[in-house]
Amino acid sequence: MKTVPENNPPGISPSAETKAMHQHLFQRGLKWLGGGVFLMALSFGINFFSIETGSGDGFIAFMYLLTTAGAAVILKGLVDMLGF
């Protein structure tokens, strides 16, 4: 009886391969999450300084754009980390 070799390299089980893939996705999710937190902090900073200086009208659209982008990037990071 002839056996068919699997695509896995010798010594690496499918569970180790799956674990490495999940670890890679988790690390990528952490990077996305960090980027989203940075965008949200930048949006908060713009909001804080525009209120302090009284020039709130010029940065409102930019602030909401950064907040929306930050929330989307955070969601992408969480999806990668949780494996959906």
Image (cartoon, rainbow, N blue to C red):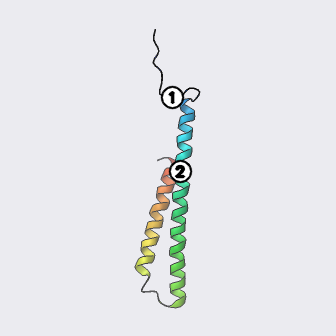
Q: Which residue is mark 2?
A: 81
In the image, residue 74 above or below residue 49: above
Q: Secondary structure at mark 2?
A: helix
Q: Residue at x 45, y 71 (%)?
A: 66
Q: Secondary structure at mark 1?
A: loop
Q: Which residue is mark 1?
A: 8
Q: Amino acid at mark 2?
A: Met
Q: Which mark is residue 30?
A: none
Residue count near mark 1 (Cα–Cα under 10 Å), binned few <14, some 14–19, many ≥20: few
Please give the count of numbered marks on the rendered protein.
2
Q: Amino acid at mark 1?
A: Asn
- The picture quadrant where one finds residue 64 is bottom left
In the image, residue 38 above or below residue 61: above
Residue closer to the observer: 48 or 27: 27
Q: Residue at x 47, y 28 (%)?
A: 7
Q: Position of residue 8 (x, y in %)?
A: 51, 28
Q: Position of residue 78 (x, y in %)?
A: 51, 55
Q: Position of residue 81 (x, y in %)?
A: 53, 50
